[in-house]
Amino acid sequence: MKTTQEIPISALPELLSLKETAEILKCHPNTLRQWDTKGILKAVRFGTRKDRKYKKDEVLKIINQNG
């Protein structure tokens, strides 16, 4: 069984990966991809593969909106 430790918000990096964001928000990565397309939680795209990264501040806004 996989366990996750609580990480203080201040210890999180400013840009979170798709996987990290999905774990924090407890949703599937495909949900985050859809939210990016719909403009709910916009991703910053990096590199030639256009990997998605999410701003910590934006993720916290989503948490506070729904919390």
Image (spheres, grey):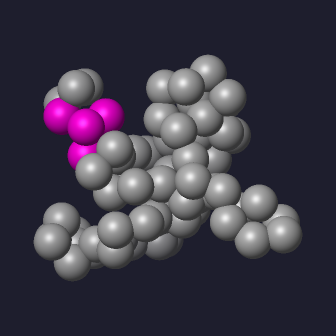
Magenta span:
60-64
Rendered view: 51 above or below 57: below
Q: Is residue 63 highlighted in magenta?
A: yes
Q: Main secondary structure of the magenta part?
A: helix
Rendered view: 20 above or below 7: above
In this orientation, does residue 28 appear? no
Q: Left or right of 56: which side holds 50? A: right
Residue 16 position in % (x across, y down): 45, 65
In front here: 34 or 48? 48
Residue 62 position in % (x across, y down): 31, 34
Total number of numbered labels? 0
In this orientation, does residue 65 appear? yes
Rendered view: 33 above or below 9: above
Q: Is residue 17 highlighted in magenta?
A: no
Rendered view: 56 above or below 48: above
Residue at left 56%, top 47%?
Answer: 43
Residue 14 position in % (x across, y down): 34, 68
Q: Left or right of 11: which side holds 31? A: right
Q: Classify the position of the C terminus by image quarter.
A: top left
Residue 41 position in % (x across, y down): 48, 35
Residue at left 43%, top 66%?
Answer: 15
Where on the picture, by quarter, is residue 34? top right
Residue at left 34%, top 74%?
Answer: 13
Residue at left 84%, top 69%?
Answer: 48
